Image (cartoon, helix red, strand yellow):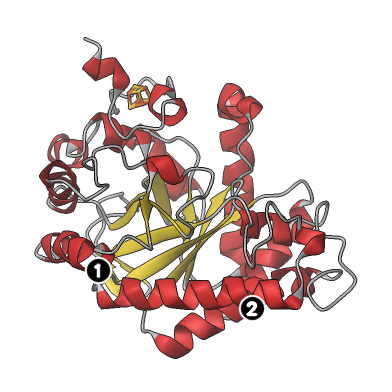
Amino acid sequence: MKDIFDEIKFGKFTVPSRIVRTGLWESQFDSQKNLTREIIDRYESLAKNNVGVIITELISMYSHDRFSDYTYSINHPFFIKEFKEVVDTVHYYNVPIFAQIGFVNCNVNGKQMMEVNDLTVEDIRTIQADYVMAAKKIAFAGFDGVELCIGNNFYLSRIMNPFENTRDDDYGGSTYNRVRMVLEIIKLIKNMTDLHIHCKVNLYHDEKDSLEICRILAENGADSLQITKFLSPQYFRKGQSNQDMLVDFASSVSDEVDIPVVLGGGFSDMGRINNLINDSNIEFVSMQRPFVKDSSFLSQWKQEGHGKSECKTCNNCYWKKQSICLIESNK
Ligand code: SF4
């Protein structure tokens, strides 16, 4: 019988639970956008309270990206120094930590808001070079891995989307061609660093094609996958039906690949998660908002053998772009 607190392998790491903490907005930095003690303490609380793998809040690939006001930037002059402190704090508790990187708007080589079909090969090489530089910084800071945001609404997810990418060169057409740009990024990062590469990938409208994308990623260097979906306002309203769809898809992906597959999608109840992992071949589940509500709740679940997060899934923290619970702070 599987339990969320099984000690289990995640790639080369042995982790204390099947729960992956994903981060979203960074809202507690100071006016210079430096990490504050509050942020470092939050990571420490996650690490000492039975999280299996910690993924940072989003780190923007570009300083003037759509969400960069609410995120740390990979180009911050003190990125390595500041995150080394976070990483060292987490490693004290033997928990792996991955840096989450992504971008939404494509503004490279002096061009603005480029559509997927308009990218030149030179633009693609520029983006890939930027990813290599980012990965090197992440490795220097001591991170164990990097999460490539190639799902949700991030730009690299649009390149893999068959409805958006209608290119007729090596970067469009077949499924493999649409994934090629990401595969080249993975290969470059692997050549330069030892980072575990975790890919957050979408279930697109075409499920068969989405499954093929996951298979290609797994066979070409991705070390783990996180299953997610395009985030529309409807996504947040539909709740349960979204979750069921993602469960079915994550289960199909788990059958297809030999690397860890993490299911996202708003789980917050220990009993439900244990039922899910025992009734399917899904091994890992990610959570974000429950950790915004309380970064230490997993220890209580472990001690009591049951539990449900107090997060009301109101999504205020998501919409207000803050990693603090607005229900709690308005009391
Ligand atoms: S603001 Fe809402 S969604 Fe966010 S942590 Fe609090 S209760 Fe949960």
Quick check: can you spot residue 1? no
Q: Could you say whether the residue bearing mark 1 is in a helix, strand or loop?
A: helix
Q: Residue at x 78, y 73 (%)?
A: 171
What is the three-letter code of the residue carrying label 1? Ile
Q: Which residue is mark 2?
A: 125
Q: Residue at x 30, y 49 (%)?
A: 4
**Residue furthest bottom as drawn:** 191
Neighbor class of circle 1 (other Cα within 10 Å; few <14, some 14-19, many 20+) is: some
Whole-percent x and y of residue 118? Answer: 80, 62
Q: Which one is nearer the viewer's eye here, 248 or 223?
A: 223
Q: Residue at x 12, y 39 (%)?
A: 303
Whole-percent x and y of residue 54? Answer: 29, 56
Determine whether the beta carbon of the residue marked 2 sits less than 8 angstroms from the nearest atom of ligand 1.
no
**Residue furthest right as drawn:** 168
Whole-percent x and y of residue 75? Answer: 38, 63
Q: Which mark is residue 80?
A: 1
Q: Which one is nearer the viewer's eye here, 136 or 45?
A: 136
Numbered marks: total: 2
Q: Which one is nearer the viewer's eye here, 324 or 13?
A: 324
Query: Residue 270 lies in what quarter of the image?
Result: top left
Q: Quadrant of the C terminus?
A: top left
Q: Could you say whether the residue bearing mark 2 is in a helix, strand or loop?
A: helix
Query: Residue 73 lies in what quarter of the image?
Result: bottom left
Quick check: can you spot residue 199? yes
Query: Residue 184 lies in what quarter of the image?
Result: bottom right
| Side (left or right) of 30 relative to 247 | left
What is the three-letter code of the residue carrying label 2? Arg
* Image quarter where ligand 1 lies: top left
Vertical arrangement, residue 291 with respect to residue 227, above or below: above
Determine whether the beta carbon of the residue marked 1 sits less than 8 angstroms from the nearest atom of ligand 1.
no
**Sequence-wise, which precedes: disc 2 or disc 1?**
1
